[in-house]
Amino acid sequence: MRPVKIRVENVSKVFGRDPAGALAKVRAGMDKGQLKAETDHVLGLHDVTLDIRAGETFVIMGLSGSGKSTLIRHFNRLIEPTGGRILFDGDDILKYDAARLQAFRRRKVAMVFQRFALLPHRTVAENVAYGLFLDGVPRAEALRRAGEQIALVGLSGFEGSYPAQLSGGMQQRVGLARALATDAEVLLMDEAFSALDPLIRHDMQVQLKELQARLGKTIVFITHDLDEALMLGDHIAILKDGTLRQVGTGAEILARPADDYVARFVRDVNRSRILLCGAFADAGLSTAPDAPVIGAEATLEAAFAAFAGGAPVVAVRDGDGRIAGALTPQRVMEALARGQG
Amino acid sequence: MTSGFPELWDTRSFGRALDAAFNGIVANWGETLEIIFMPVLRAITGLERGLQFLPWWVVVALFCAATWGAGRKVVPVIVVAALLVLLGLLGVWNDAMATVALMLAATVLSVLIGVPLGIAMSRSDRVRGGMLPVLDIMQTMPIFVYLIPFVMLFGPGKIPALLATIVFAIPPVIRLTDLGIRQVDAEIVEAARAFGASPRQQLWTVQVPLAMPTIMAGINQTTMMALSMVVIASMIGAGGLGYQVLQGIQRLEVSRGLIAGLGIVLLAIIFDRIAQSYGRRVQANLHREGK
Ligand SMILES: Nc1ncnc2c1ncn2[C@@H]1O[C@H](COP(=O)(O)OP(=O)(O)OP(=O)(O)O)[C@@H](O)[C@H]1O
Ligand SMILES: [Mg+2]
């Protein structure tokens, strides 16, 4: 298994005048609503523990106000926790002094923002080079490296433009290039694609997946959109009112939601794009030699085409190339119907 | 006569003590203060003499260059040149140059003091809480209340005029620097922080540049207020156009007052044009579209 990149241990965050006192009340059993009504403190996060592994895309989901932005801002200490520990490569980042924290932010983590947050008075190239300028990289060198990232996100030729001259999708590419330019190991993306229209959004998702495959970064990605979460996430965490409800792969969460909230959360997703044929193949079913064959890692949606072609059964081949079982339309329907009640 | 409010404490002896303390300061520190402000006085006098000594067209050229540098636009340059020529035609050139010197000195000093104060205010709510009432007092206190102590300290002349002008004109640049920095999009500042900007780097790469249009509006207001102060400053020996206005009033020469007043208006328009074209260019840089 890949090593842990970021470990979050019992992190809690309360906003208000006396966070520690309010947190004690929460520990004694007060919930978010009561805390707000009785003490005017806001519970941002409560006792969140999770591991993010090197090289994975970790998606954080939850309704508005559930604490997603609060959580991701703990990873580079834009927000200080009220309690708990945050380890980066095993290092407790809460122990860093100001200088060390600045160096950490300049080299180890980079962030992409929902509303892009580009510097309007600087050109695309200067924006992308911003993190390098801060780190004292000489201007020519910084601009050269910025140029490479600009090419990587497909914006060559726009180096001298200003952010306001670009479309939203292009601006977010600049944001992405800025985050890539410092060569940080971890990218934090807070609803990075939410402000984009669906087509551009899909392009960006595909581009991010490619980048991820090529560069092997660890990506923490926040989204409201379950389809986006399932497409990008190796693991998905679901937050509600500042508490962590479930962490797992998309298929795990769909197959076994931890509680009612999660179940309702995932109810409307297109299950045929997520569930894998391997998980529903019937090993006892024999197949004709001329039956169409499909990989165990294919989604149920991929099996539809075979059934549409008139085949009564589809053989499922596992990773070793052996036929592990078969699917019938009946079984596929059952798989899709489950959890729909 | 009885007062409507009972006398709970001895205001008269308090007043006397205050006067005594102030007189003490004048007696003991007056000379020292004068020496301290000597370089400033020399600078203003030098600037005034320089502007009066240079051929008029050189001065016009200098103003044009400043306007071009501020806005990179041709029209304001032409307007400024035309207004300056008009000023010369009115026959108040030398007085106008004296006023320009005093006003420039007051504005430059106001900006040098006011912008850092505004920055300090924007960074700490406590500093802001302390500054706001002081600024309110500066803006509501009748000018003569502090004009007279300044004259007592320095004697009539350019220095008390300068100081009174600064006190009068500095609040807008302080307030608008504070406001401008506080209004900068929090997400952009957060982005700078996320990329490891130190507080100083946040200030100079994000906050001040993005607050610039607002800061410029403050500088513009400060310039206008400094200019409007020249008439009053002339009463304590600052000379310039204000003095001509004063003479006009004293001698009941309507024409003299009118012409000098017109000169002040022309100067106001000139400086407003320069400051505004700079402000507009900064604004355009922030929200550049097309081209
Ligand atoms: N600076 C703050 N002061 C007080 N309360 C805050 C602060 N920041 C966040 N909160 C509160 O913490 C809770 C979690 O907020 P957060 O921004 O993390 O939610 P989110 O899941 O990112 O929501 P969204 O999807 O709308 O972005 C909310 O109840 C919010 O009101
Ligand atoms: Mg959020």
Image (tube, helix red, strand yellow):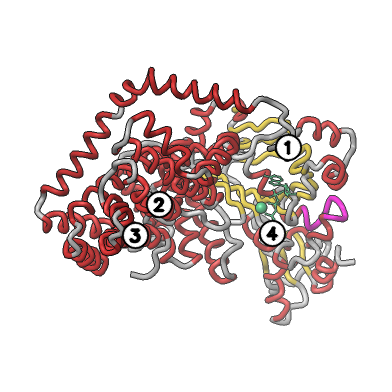
Question: B66 or A193: which is nearer to us?
Answer: B66
Mark 1–mark 3 contact, CB under 8 Å? no
* CA–CA distance in space, label 4 to label 2: 52 Å
**Secondary structure found at label 4:** loop
Mark 2–mark 1 contact, CB under 8 Å? no
- Chain under disc 4: A
Other-residue count near label 4 (Cα within 10 Å), few / some / many at <14 / 14–19 / ≥20: some
Q: Amino acid at mark 3?
A: Asp
Q: Is mark 4 within 8 Å of ligand 1?
A: yes
Q: Amino acid at mark 1?
A: Phe
Q: Is mark 2 within 8 Å of ligand 1?
A: no
In front: mark 3 or mark 2?
2
Would residue B142 be found to the left or right of residue B31 on screen?
Answer: right
Would residue A18 be found to the left or right of residue B91 on screen?
Answer: right
The C terminus of chain B, quarter of image:
bottom left
Q: Amino acid at mark 2?
A: Met
Question: B204 or A217: which is nearer to us?
Answer: B204
Pointer 3 or 2: first along the chain: 2
Q: Tell me which residue sits at (69%, 75%) in the image.
A: A306
In front: mark 4 or mark 3?
3
Residue on which disc 1 sits:
B5
Q: Which residues are magenta?
A: A253-261
Is residue A128 part of the magenta span, yes or no?
no
Residue on which disc 2 sits:
B225
Would residue B74 be found to the left or right of residue A192 on screen?
Answer: left
In front: mark 2 or mark 1?
1
Which percent across, then down, holds residue A14? 75, 38
Residue on which disc 4 sits:
A224
Which percent across, then down, holds residue A69? 66, 48
Question: A220 or A283: which is nearer to us?
Answer: A220
